[in-house]
Amino acid sequence: MNSVLIYQDATKLAQLIRTKEVSPVEVMQAHLDRIEALNPKVNAIVTVAQDALKEAKAAEAVVLSGAELGPLHGVPFTVKDSIDTAGVLTQRGSPIFKGRVPGADATSVARMKRAGGILLAKTNLPEFSYWIESDNLLSGASNNPWDLTRTPGGSSGGESAAIAAGMSPIGLGTDLAISVRGPAAQTGITSMKATHGRVPMTGIWPRAPRRFWHVGPMARSVRDIALAFSQLAGPDGKDAFSTSTVQYDAGIGRMPFGPLRIGWMVGPGFGPIDPEVAATVKAAAKALQDMGIFVEQVGIPALERDFALDVFNKLHVMEMKPAFAAVTAGRRQDELYKMAKTMLSLPDTSMQDYIEAEQAAERLRDGYADYFSRYDALITHVLPIPAHKHGVDSFVIDGQTVDATYLQGATVPLNVTGLPGVAMRFGTSKEGLPINVQIVGKWQAESTILHVASLLEAVSSVRDLRPSL
């Protein structure tokens, strides 16, 4: 039974629990056993919640009582270790926060629990959630379940690896420029960065600045992402960016009236892309076209005028560096890892460059607004290459040498503009590694992109593949 349970999606597990075909205790024990067996290899889990089994027994009693159950009742979930969990270590990948135990849950965690989910464990991340690999001085590097010599990405790499390896059915990550979508692509799972502010960032460090940060669900299926988002979305009265009262339920539908119009692109404006990845984007577009949907190759001139990665770098260094400086002030150098030292060493953005970057960000938002006046969704790649080896600082992509930050070329525009995006697997590299595509929608159009993702999921030939650990 355990081998069956660990690869069920969260929606199915909730159904099995609701119908008493399995108990929450069985489900929790299956995942605890999986963690014990695989985590020494993958290093995705950094802390197991001590009360997980106790909470599962309490959930079982509720089922047997006949009481009304939440949509995720009895389902284990994991949480990136930058997100506060009451009574459970939240150490943010840094010795500075070693032993830190929050007194309250982040809003997103509280909402998962309110839906009936049970906190299973915390997952690995880079120092301060800030890099494209999940490695830090406290817990070391996480490995990709598809190839342990490769990274599962960052900054939500521990979360993506745990889900891909069957150690967790669903969880929460955060995204500054790539961090729920990139790791999903490197491990072949599904994730969503919703419209900025749709899910409150309360209880997640850094408190400020938050204008590029998102918290989002990561799972194995589109329906799980839709279900989690239906529970997570909405203001909490504490995060001033979270103001939208647009409702979303877990039934995967779409908002536009009339036939869908979808564009696809792999550039220009994103940087170089591996031909295998480009072919996967094109295949996803063709799959939608074969369903009778209007699909065509497009360009967004604003992305060609203002390279979003450069815009982001000028803005976020100005805003993130003070947060790093404040928390590291007076700390020993041996308490700081690569990215804290790198951030603190970066030159300040000049005021002129900052203002120009702000204006460029507005042009990018206007460019996407113009695009979405004619189309309902956009299909792009997530990453320009499949999962890479640990510790690589530069890549040759389609004949062009670029530094590692270029992996964010197609993801960071959504952080600069606040647009929503779903990452889901649709291909496999010649080395057997997952390749994901990204479905982008207009602001607050999560329903549309989840609908498009569900259409692609239904015809994908790779949705049931699992790493052979």
Image (cartoon, rainbow, N blue to C red):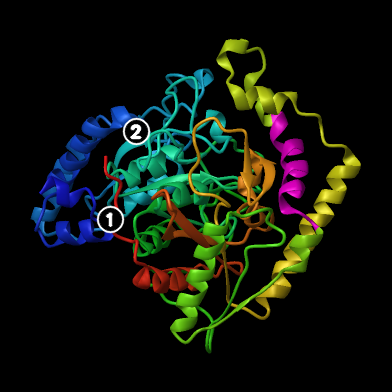
Cα distance, mark 2 to mark 1?
Answer: 21 Å
Question: Within 10 angstroms of label 2, few (less than 14), some, or many (20 or more) residues?
Answer: many
Which one is closest to the eye, mark 2 or mark 1? 2
Element under disc 1: helix
Name the main secondary structure of what is drawn in magenta: helix
Tell me residue 68's x, y (percent).
20, 61
Residue in the image at 67% along x and 62% along y: 267
Q: Is residue 9 above or below residue 152?
A: below
Q: Which mark is residue 10?
A: 1
The C terminus sits in image quarter: top left
Q: Is residue 188 above or below residue 152?
A: below
Q: Which mark is residue 27?
A: none
- Asked if residue 281 is among those painted magenta in the image, a careful observer would answer no
The residue singled out by tag 2 in the image is 42
Residue in the image at 29% along x and 51% along y: 466
Residue 71 appears in the figure: no
Q: Are marks 2 and 1 in contact (CB under 8 Å)?
A: no
Q: Which residues are magenta?
A: 306-322
Tell me residue 88's x, y (percent).
36, 30
Element under disc 2: helix
- Asked if residue 314 is among those painted magenta in the image, a careful observer would answer yes
Specify the amino acid type for callout 2. Val
- Asked whether, in this view, residue 284 is left or right of residue 221, the answer is right
**Mark sitting earlier along the chain (2/1):** 1
Specify the amino acid type for callout 1. Ala
Q: Is residue 337 above or below residue 26?
A: above
